[in-house]
Image: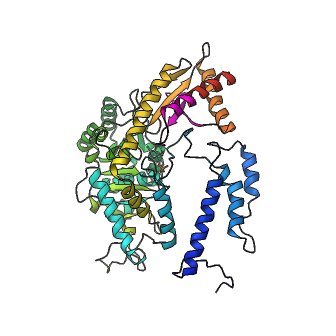
């Protein structure tokens, strides 16, 4: 067919299996060859652009896979962020369970597409089963449902779309009613930026999101929420959704979900919880109580590509009442036909059409690891963040900016005699120097208007010793930068 001998597809023949096995061995060899490197490349952006320019994506004729992979290994993989390095600690960007990574291969070669039953017969029901199980874990009723998405941003969008359609049945068909100009979504000022993005996409405008003040730990302040709700009532605005965050991006704070659920119920508003980060606490008997109130949510975002160690993308949007997902359904004659009422077509729950069978890697790796071990890893990271907070406090050159609550440690360098603006510059310089040298990937954000450094601990292999050494390096770098 192709005029070449090497099989291109896994077609069931022995030759195709051999070819895949050999290709996988080549990939593994390349990975092994790039193991020994710092968490970040010491190349500057221009150097990385040059390295990328040396990679030809579409030659006229085939090149041997080994050669291609060797080239890609040198120019690309060797210059990546190394998520397994304990000093790669800026983002919610974890090492991945190797059982999930290996299962990615099965997802790729079998290529089920989750939009319709006739493209994913068993996969459809397996994703449905996985989502139900996650719903039960979150404490939702048995009738809860959900769907996998590419990430927390997509899950938050879908959750808030359901909130919008709940506020005005028919908005999904007829567009926004005039009252929508007065609709508001209440989320804390520490909520993820995707909440504002979702409001923009949904036609409400970013400023329909009212930022509610937080306490010092970055959790929504309930009296402030009450004041916001009163203020909205007085101006005739309509709160259509309250968004709680279970694990904020910068402080890891968990909003008082029970109180938020009460306020949402009183206001007749949808209660969405962004548990992109905090959903992993559900795994642990010890930590689960921190999420009390989550079970009252109308919709929940849970990112499994964060503290559940799945390769990107693996997020889920859980919905308390499966029927409400119906507002997403748009039948098409070729796909989710109205006369095929007896089959499940997951496109009916999703904003995507073609979609990967990510449920498989999740299911395989969760089973192969077991809840108890996953829980132990989450607990280790939460404990590590607490001890890292102490380690920051123990160093006079550093200042802890918020008490660690889940896996984030927010701090900054300080230096005697420097005003706030110079301190900001110093902290920017520290983060940039560490990144440019490739030695450490430390987060940089702002807290209460000032530049802050951040460790996000997602690597269960990281020890207190790794953190102590990293903090010492931060201190030394600050001295150099000052
Ligand atoms: C609290 C929270 N929600 C949502 C997101 C967005 O998730 P994703 O990057 O998977 O789209 C993030 C990302 O860090 C987050 O921290």
Query: Closest to the observer: 438 or 343?
Result: 438
Q: Is residue 451 among the parts visible in the rendering?
A: no
Q: Residue at x 61, y 77 (%)?
A: 8
The N terminus - image quarter: bottom right
Q: Is residue 48 left or right of residue 400?
A: right
In this view of the protein, which residue sits in the foreground, 41 or 204? 41
- Residue lying at the far top of the rendered structure: 417
Residue 332 figure quarter: bottom left
Quarter of the image where one finds residue 63 = bottom right
Quadrant containing the C terminus is top right
Residue under the image location 47 percent in, 63 percent down = 103
Residue 98: image location, x then y, percent: 49, 56
Left or right: residue 435 versus residue 384 is: right
Percent of width and height locating residue 230: 30, 34
Q: Residue furthest bottom?
A: 1
Query: What's the residue at 53%, 28% (across, down)?
Result: 468
Residue 160: x, y in percent? Answer: 38, 52
Q: Which residues are magenta?
A: 440-469
Relative vertical location of residue 223 with respect to residue 182 in this rendering, above or below = above
Inspect the magenta stretch and tell me whether residue 276 lies in it.
Answer: no
| Res 121 seen here | yes
Q: Which one is in front, 237 or 329?
A: 329
Q: Is residue 7 above or below residue 482?
A: below
- Residue 130 rendering spot, x and y as whole percentages: 34, 61
- Its colouring scheme is rainbow
């Amino acid at each position: 067919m192709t005029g070449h001998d090497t099989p291109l597809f896994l077609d069931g023949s022995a030759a195709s299996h051999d070819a895949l096995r050999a290709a996988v061995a080549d990939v593994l060899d390349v990975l092994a060859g790039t193991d020994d490197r710092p968490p970040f490349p010491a190349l500057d952006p221009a150097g990385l652009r040059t390295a990328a320019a040396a990679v030809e994506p579409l030659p006229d004729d085939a090149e041997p896979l080994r050669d291609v992979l060797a080239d890609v290994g040198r120019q690309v993989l060797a210059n990546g962020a190394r998520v397994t390095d304990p000093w790669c600690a800026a983002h919610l960007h974890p090492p991945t369970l190797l059982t999930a990574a290996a299962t990615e291969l099965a997802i790729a070669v079998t290529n089920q597409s989750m939009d319709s039953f006739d493209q994913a017969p068993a996969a459809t029901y397996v994703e449905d089963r996985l989502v139900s199980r996650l719903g039960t874990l979150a404490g939702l009723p048995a009738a809860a449902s959900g769907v996998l998405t590419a990430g927390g941003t997509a899950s938050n969008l879908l959750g808030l779309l359901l909130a919008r359609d709940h506020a005005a049945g028919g908005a999904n068909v007829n567009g926004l009613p005039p009252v929508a100009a007065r609709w508001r979504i209440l989320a804390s000022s520490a909520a993820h930026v995707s909440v504002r993005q979702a409001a923009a996409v949904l036609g409400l405008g970013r400023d329909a999101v009212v930022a509610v003040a937080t306490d010092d730990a970055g959790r929504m302040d309930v009296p402030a929420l009450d004041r916001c709700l009163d203020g909205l009532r007085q101006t005739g605005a309509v709160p259509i959704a309250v968004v709680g965050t279970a694990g904020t991006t910068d402080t890891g704070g968990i909003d008082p979900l029970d109180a938020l659920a009460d306020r949402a119920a009183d206001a007749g508003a949808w209660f969405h919880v962004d548990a992109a980060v905090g959903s992993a606490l559900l795994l642990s008997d010890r930590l689960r109580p921190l999420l009390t109130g989550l079970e009252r949510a109308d919709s929940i975002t849970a990112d499994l590509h964060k503290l559940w160690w799945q390769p990107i993308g693996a997020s889920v949007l859980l919905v308390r009442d499966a029927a409400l997902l119906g507002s997403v359904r748009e039948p098409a004659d070729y796909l989710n036909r109205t006369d095929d009422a007896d089959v499940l077509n997951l496109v009916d729950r999703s904003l995507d059409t073609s979609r990967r069978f990510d449920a498989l890697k999740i299911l395989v790796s969760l089973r192969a690891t077991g809840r108890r071990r996953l829980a132990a890893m989450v607990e280790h990271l939460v404990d590590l963040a607490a001890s890292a907070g102490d380690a920051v406090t123990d160093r006079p050159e550093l200042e802890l900016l918020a008490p660690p609550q889940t896996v984030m440690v927010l701090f900054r360098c300080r230096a005697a005699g420097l005003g706030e603006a110079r301190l900001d510059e110093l902290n920017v310089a520290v983060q940039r120097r560490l990144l440019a040298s490739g030695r450490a990937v430390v987060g940089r954000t702002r807290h209460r208007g000032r530049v802050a450094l951040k460790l996000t601990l997602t690597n269960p292999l990281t020890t207190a010793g790794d953190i102590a050494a990293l903090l010492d390096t931060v201190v030394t770098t600050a001295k150099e930068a000052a």
